[in-house]
Amino acid sequence: MELIKWKGILEALLFAAGDEGLSLSQISAVLELEEFQAAHIVASLKEEYDAGHRGITIAEMAGGFQLVTKKEHSDYLKRLVETPGNQSLSQAALETLAIVAYKQPITRAEIEEIRGVKTERPLQTLVSKALIKEVGRAEGSGRAYLYGTTKEFLEHFGLKTIEELPPLAERGEDDIENGEADLFFGNFPDPVE
Amino acid sequence: MELIKWKGILEALLFAAGDEGLSLSQISAVLELEEFQAAHIVASLKEEYDAGHRGITIAEMAGGFQLVTKKEHSDYLKRLVETPGNQSLSQAALETLAIVAYKQPITRAEIEEIRGVKTERPLQTLVSKALIKEVGRAEGSGRAYLYGTTKEFLEHFGLKTIEELPPLAERGEDDIENGEADLFFGNFPDPVE
Amino acid sequence: MAYNVKIDAFEGPMDLLLHLINRLEIDIYDIPMAEITGQYMAYIHAMKELELDIASEYLVMAATLLAIKSKMLLPIYEDDHSADETEYDDDPRDELVEKLIEYRKYKEAAVEFKHMEEERSLMFSKPPSDLSQFSKEIEPSRQELNVTLYDMLGAFQKLLRRQKLKKPAFTRITRREISIEKRMEEILENLNKVKKRTSFFELFPYPEKEYIVVTFLAVLELMKMNEIFVEQDSNFAEIFVVAKEGVEAVGTH
């Protein structure tokens, strides 16, 4: 296959991997290539990003590669953060809220494990809007904060009790077949152990 | 500024927004451009993605633009996947959802009338997956809930708007030939109205 | 006669009827009632024999089929009255056929939906990036929350749709850049919140090396600045940390 096609595939892989990035060994395993070949593709994709007026590039960190936005565009990203969307809560905050609502009490590390991205900011937002609060500390040496929903949360969504939340679809027979529920309810390692 | 630079900035913005996506008005606000100008940049970036051997492209879903990997690379991506993403819906849920999508707003009793079976479970599944929601109450003594589709419905099926739904098959052609069809079914109210 | 009965394969009596109509290659507009009823009943019996639970809807439909069948056996009276009634109105099958056609439309639409769903699943996305480095502190806003429960559930479905990728075989790439300043602020904030002395160990909620180092440096820095006091009652006893009264945050506020 031509290099240009490999670069396209690599771009797709790195994009989907998001902040978790991919190691060279993962890349070469997925592409079924030798590591030196994979490294060559990574290098030429990075070259392409850096040569052109692209918005993203490849960053290498801790033995892995990930796509990142170029620094020169940070002013626009700043503006993006400051430009209110049509919803008063971001996707990140809503996701976090759903996780807290269904899995409370839960630590930040556990939420980040589920979301795969840093979640400090969404948690702060939700606390500042009084939708969630610290409800205690996790057991163990870490003693991380545990989060839970508030009375305001119930009021805002018109619920009498937390049990009134619609059951998550994960118990339906649709899901059991393909085990998607694991993502949410599986036994991810307790980070505070 | 040149178009090529705008494209780079847009790429950075869309990358950062991830699957939250950006609406045209958000893009034009951040770029401080008119919407038609922003639309032009979106279109030319998408063109660039689609013309070349790129791994990603722009998808318009539920009123927003977001970066997604190209379908043609899904085989490679699946090799990386640990947990399958959104599981597919059961037949019962799909039938129920089709009825809601084309006949919304609609009550449970009306859906059951069409399907000829109890539909409480599939409805519950669809609500908890946020594919449908209660959009009001029916007139009359029962005041039953009326259901309609959500933004997540559009996202789930990759649709821009509800109007993009394929038209309901009017099994017309093969039936009209045998004449009786007209006799019986000529005057049915169109369910999509 | 061997029936391959799998009740789960049918979404209800309508679905079963459509299946029979297809299999027998019957014209849906001219259903031979005796034949279809016979076939339908055979299915019901087979289900019974397999001791499957038969939903009541299947039995209701069986009764309907039998009723239509018997009506069609009745002699047709030439009506001498009711001129406004059209003759094709009294085909007893009409209502059933109408329902079957209606149901079939949605059943076919469901197939289309399934196809769209599959196509959609070929596209992969990424979560929104963490942009906190670009934003200022969150001011508690008075802005009205305009989100509903469905927005929350929808956001959660988005999260589920992201296919979870395998973790890198060795190191996970972390980009957790915690500054000592930030950690100092956090520590002070927490100490001020509890308003009494806190165990030193509680300052280390995450078992990550980087985090522990930064926290440790932050504590040293705070001690140097006299913002916190560290107490230990005796050798090897638990170490406690307490905030200097009135101190809220470093530098700011």
Image (cartoon, coloured by chain):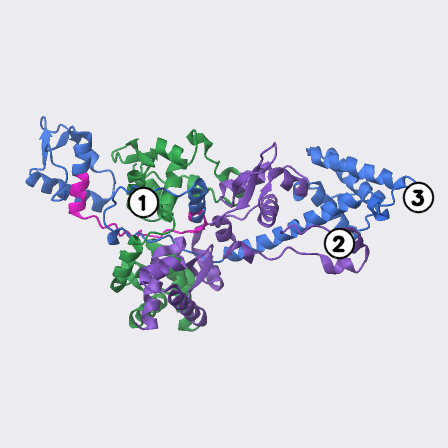
Chain colours: A green, B purple, C blue
Q: What residue type is disc 1 on?
A: Pro
Which chain does tag 1 point to? Answer: A
Is any part of residue A26 visible from this angle?
Answer: no
Residue C78's disc number = 3
Is any part of residue C189 visible from this angle?
Answer: yes
Q: Position of residue B135 (x, y in %)?
A: 52, 42
Element class at badge 1:
helix
Q: What residue type is disc 3 on?
A: Glu
A4 over C199 or under it: above or below? below
Q: Residue A41: which quarter of the image?
A: bottom left
Element class at badge 3:
loop
Which chain does tag 2 point to? Answer: B
Q: Position of residue C71 (x, y in %)?
A: 86, 39
A130 over B14 or under it: above or below? above
Q: Residue at x 28, y 39 (%)?
A: A128
Name the outermost residue toward the top: C233
Badge count: 3
Q: What residue type is disc 2 on?
A: Gly
**What is the magenta range?**
C159-187
Q: Residue at x 75, y 54 (%)?
A: B186
On whether disc 2 and disc 3 are found on a single subunit, the reply is no
A145 over C94 or under it: above or below? above
On whether disc 1 and disc 2 are found on a single subunit, the reply is no
Disc 2 to disc 3, C-alpha distance: 25 Å
Residue A122's disc number = 1
* Residue occupied by mark 2: B186
Disc 1 to disc 2, C-alpha distance: 56 Å
Q: Nearer the viewer, mark 1 or mark 3?
A: 3
Element class at badge 2:
loop
Q: Residue at x 47, y 54 (%)?
A: B62
**Looking at the image, do the residues carrying marks 1 and 3 touch, with CB atoms under 8 Å apart?**
no
